[in-house]
Image: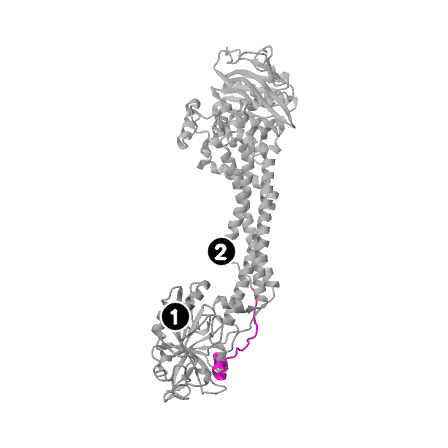
Amino acid sequence: MTVPTTPTDASTVTSPGLAKVMYQLSGVRRFFNKNGEVVRALDGVNLTIDEGEFLAVQGPTGEGKSTLMLMLGGLDRPTEGQVSFKGRNLGALREHELAPLRAKEFGFVFQTFNLIPTLTAYENVEAALEPFGLHAAERKRRVTAVLAELGLGDRGRHLPSELSGGQQQRVAIARALVKNPTVLLADEPTGNLDEDTRDEIVGLLEGLWREHGLTLVIVTHDSSIARRAQRISLIRGGRLSAKPQAPA
Amino acid sequence: MAMQTWCISPADLSKAAAKSPPKLGGRANFAGHAGAGEEMGDEMTGFFVTYLRRELGRRMRQGVFVALGLALGVGLVVTVAAASAGVTKAQSGVLSGLYGVGTDITVNGPLWITTHQYCTRSGCEAGPNCTPRGCHGKPELGLQTKIQTPYFDTVSASTVAAVGRLHDVTAATGVLTFVYGLKHAQSGNFTVDGVGTRHSAVGPLSADRVVSGHDFTAADSDAGVALVDSVYAAISNLRVGSVITIGQVRFTVIGIVAGPAGTSPVEVYIPVARAQALGAGLANQVNLIYVATASAADVSAVQGEISRLLPGDTVNTDGSLFSRTWPAPSGVASVVTGSLADTTKLANDLGRWVSVLALLAAFAVACLLTMAAVGRRSAEFGTLKALGWRMRRITVQVLGESLITGILGAAAGVGVGFAGAAIIAAVAPTLSATDATAIGSMQQVAQNGSAAPVASGPVWVPMSPSISAGVIVLAVILAMAGALLAGAFGSWRAARLRPADALRRVE
């Protein structure tokens, strides 16, 4: 069991496994100033995530789930505390140091897909390879393969607007996976999808996690999705608490 | 599922890293991922172009709007520049018509003709002291009674060389000018200039153009050849190949020349050596020196230098009597009147400010629209950052899009400029200028012996705007500058976007 470096409290959630620690969040606070009022998006979060773990962070809208996800992806910095990824403090890294991390280590899946509307499905996936400087032939091989594996082999030339919500989210997942990240961060990945598609996408993510050995973190308000994770952390008022473990 | 097929192997990543040495400290922590932050390799320019093309296509309306804004501003600059060039050209035409071109200063000796006295072979017609310097020892052009004395006292050609060596003098040429014909005759006389046969930017022929035949060549320096003014040729029924006789010497007309509008041209030009051979004692003598200075600002200084070098001679810079040509620019400016000066000032002042304002407006519109577009794309940029794109790479993308817009704006701007110039050419009035101090031809002076200025009529010159290659280059540079400025602002705004903030806007 990995033990956080800060004293355990109600907001401390630790990994139950013995695997190598991927993330360690210690006393993370993230405050915003909104219209003169201080919003405590995260308020003293301690969290440990092991390598290869499937963690669900469940909580209502506006309780800090997305902020936590941005912290894990090196897209935001804590007001206080430390977000450690593989032993490196993400909050202390400069932007030009974070960019390669994001490119290589993190795959993001957003609720609104965040596909670039002017690019085709193929090009959206290809955009994730832009930082690597790969040859066109190699890019093509990888993009084609990942699209085919996600059942989008015949949708490469389609613009996002020509795809269904489920297909768009598949493209977004392909974009996250094409670079073979170590962590897949999914922020309400089914929030904009119908129930059938939701199950399909969650099943897909779960399958990818199992087959790739990814570390998968899903934030969701949907307990049916959260239940599929190895471990569930509840978030409320910017504070985390552990939830009784559901079977993996 | 065989998911590994698309995965990037550590070997692949090492290869990428080898092409782009990693900058990230502690890269060892990310073994196999080195080089991830080194973007924009040659292989990725294809994606750059794809993304660029797609974005421009998606925002075509905005791009066209920005390009048109730039085009309008740049087109106005081109139009004003063209109009200004047209006015300047017209001004040059008028000025050369009134004064000739190229020559800043003329130098001549004391005037002889004012007393109607001239030298003949037998000496000074009116007595031994008929000239300010006396006839004694001076040229006698009395070989033929028809050859009148040159208007001005003569100087040696070496004097011309001395003038040419003065500081700030760029060119100096000597001319032997005289009137051929019966003294006191009211008609039939014509002016003759003995000129150098090498082309020169200064001198009586500098503003003329050959309308028939050909110009003098170096080989004509001692040949019996002549150039004849087109008006005189028409009156005298002369053409190329005709023969005219001056002092019993036959000269074959090899070219018909025309001076600028409004000039009082010399009727006949012959090689100076032949002119000098017409009169005894004229060998190597000239009586009018044309001088060009390096700049208008040098005229006064050069004038002083010449006056010191030739204390007895007249140095003309202001269009005064007998500076048949070609006063200094300072003199020109003071005597040009009429719509020409007004139009020039209007074009140069009003046009310049209108252009500046239009350009500023175009730049401001381009900047605001680009920044607004970047604001609308904040989620997109946030996503790209989440994908690991560096800000530099995003900046290149934004600048690339702006640059393409600038190129389109430049092309359209040049088109607008040409259209504007065409419109001006179609509607612009003919310009006029009047020189209140202009004088008539030397022949008139020679014949009248009058020192009074003879008013010349206004010179009418149509204004035809012209667009030079330099203006087109300027237009392209301005459009590019505007587009890049807009792109820079857009990039600046994009750079200020924090990924989290950008993503939150759509979450």
Is B449 covered by the magenta stretch? yes
Nearest the eye: B410 or B305: B305
Return the disc, 2 or 1, that comes first in the chain's sequence.
1
Percent position of residue B480, x then y: 52, 47
Q: Residue A158 lies in what quarter of the image? A: top right
The part of the chain drawn in magenta is B442-463
Find residue B342 and name its label: none
Mark 1 belongs to chain: B
Percent position of residue A73, x then y: 53, 24
Q: Residue B155 lies in what quarter of the image? A: bottom left
Q: Identify the residue shown where x is 38% and y is 80%.
A: B275
Mark 1 secondary-structure assignment:
helix
The amino acid type found where label 2 is placed reads Gly
Discs 2, 1: same chain:
yes
Find residue B308 and name its label: 1
Query: Taking the image as drawn, is residue A192 in sight?
Result: no
Find residue B470 and name its label: 2
Is B426 covered by the magenta stretch? no
